[in-house]
Amino acid sequence: MAARVFKIVASRPTKLLLQPFKTGTRLARCQSAKAATYESTIENLPETRVTTLDNGVRVATEDSGIPTCTVGLWIDAGSRFETAKNNGTAHFLEHMAFKGTKKRSQTDLELEVENMGAHLNAYTSREQTVYYAKSFSKDVNKAMDILSDILQNSTLGEQEIESKRGVILREMQEVDTNLQEVVFDHLHAVAYQGTPLGRTILGPTENIMTINRNDLLEYIGNHYKGPRIVLAGAGGVDHDELVKHAQQYFGNLGAGYEGKIPTLETCRFTGSEVRVRDDTMPLAHIAIAVEGCGWTNPDNIALMVANTLIGSWDRSFGAGANMASQLASQSASMNLCHSFQSFNTCYTDTGLWGMYFVCERDQVEFMMTAVQREWMRLCRRKISPVELERAKRLLKTNMLLQLDGSTPACEDIGRQMLCYGRRIPFSEIEARIDAVDTRVLKSVCTKYLYDKCPAIAAVGPVEALPIYSRLRSEMYSLQV
């Protein structure tokens, strides 16, 4: 669950003197120069450099030479490492990070960030906790000092803890109004019932009311260890300089465990359903998913291609029935839904691959049928080479667009270092995507989709949603 933006400081507008460019100037020559090719762009992507400190903290950077940078701490600790008793602690701790340290009061912290013109933020997911700062490259040392301070010296005062309870409870109320968030929380709860992945990131209300300072300190002591932390930097960052700062600020961070070493509990997938029927709601919100694979599973690339092939659609899209995605074309021409999006959510050893859609109550059955038929089409090798090539190109484009800027690039570095133990070069990702042909696509989709028990979460006027046994029977076809 992403936290609110801590501070965004807008710079004062600068007056620009607009003058016509003379012929023969550098700009005119640049405009006539040949654009860089896709291949040359990929080859010239900045190198990712990695250094490991003695205590296990990994420093990974990508220097693109721009005047701003993003540096952050990616920690292998999220709600999945919690128990039913302390569920919500990781997210609570994230909120407490900005409430003051032994060196800085909350006011001092806010003023320092403002005076830098920086942006400080944090978020918690089911497997990771992240603290990051975006600033001018010349202020990277100050940003590192602040990140180090909030990570290691937060006061976690009783008064601040009490005030944060109300903030988190209000955040929970806001989440309850976001039906997509509600549906995905229900989907995790039913798909991974009885396991840590089935719990919410924010935790239940009763936990929020009882979490205390000792719970927060215990979570830090159990999980904020050197080998589980990646210091990532992107933009205008010098790797050697960042390593020196890392040694200065994080070199004394502990690497060992005093008690039992925390281990990742296996989270089993259960094909089942949950329905929250509310006929007063105007639209039905439904998610259906099968168990996907973890980050390091080689099948993940083919599932990503399949996910892109199905795509997403919204009524606001201008193309409508002329879109390349067959499901989008059907949805537009037959008015099946208001929107849909295919998703591929990965964790360390498992994942959810599926579809989320919003539709009218009288279209629920027809939309669900269309989704499952599209899934079976993937298993029957009825995907044309042209359709597959389009999906692969779109996937590559989306991956590159998601890295536009120092913050997305820094996030990608931190996540990949935790998930893969390295930053995968885009040329390697591209080669793995290109290796997916119609045979591979059918094989992988059949492995994960065909005759599998899905997990289903439905909220709203869902009376027309077929019973689970029928939906289960639609997960196979005699024509495979």
Image (cartoon, rainbow, N blue to C red):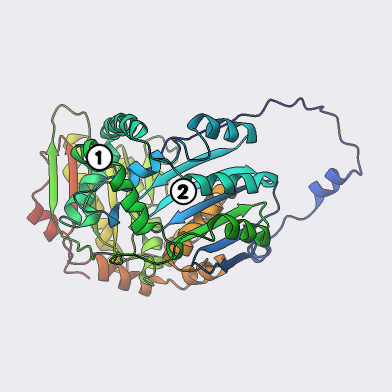
Q: Position of residue 476 (x, y in %)?
A: 17, 65
Up-down: is 196 above or below 359? Answer: below
Q: Which disc number belongs to residue 198?
A: none
Which residue is drawn at the image coordinates 26% and 67% (left, top)? 448
Q: Identify residue type, mark 1.
A: Val
Which residue is drawn at the image coordinates 36% and 64% (left, top)? 303
Q: Is residue 349 left or right of residue 137?
A: left
Q: Position of residue 56 (x, y in %)?
A: 49, 67
Up-down: is 163 above or below 456? Answer: above
Q: Which disc number belongs to residue 151?
A: 2
Q: Identify residue type, mark 2.
A: Leu
Check whether the beta carbons of the residues at disc 1 and disc 2 lie within 8 A of each other: no
- What residue sits right under mark 1 in the picture? 182
Give the total number of marks visible in the rendering: 2
Helix, strand or loop under label 1: helix
Q: Position of residue 277 (x, y in %)?
A: 12, 36
Ranked by sequence position, the earlier of labels 1 and 2 is 2
Please state which of the two labelled residues, at mark 1 or mark 2, is closer to the viewer: 2
Q: Measure the C-alpha gap from mark 1 to mark 2.
A: 30 Å
Q: Is residue 112 left or right of residue 267?
A: right
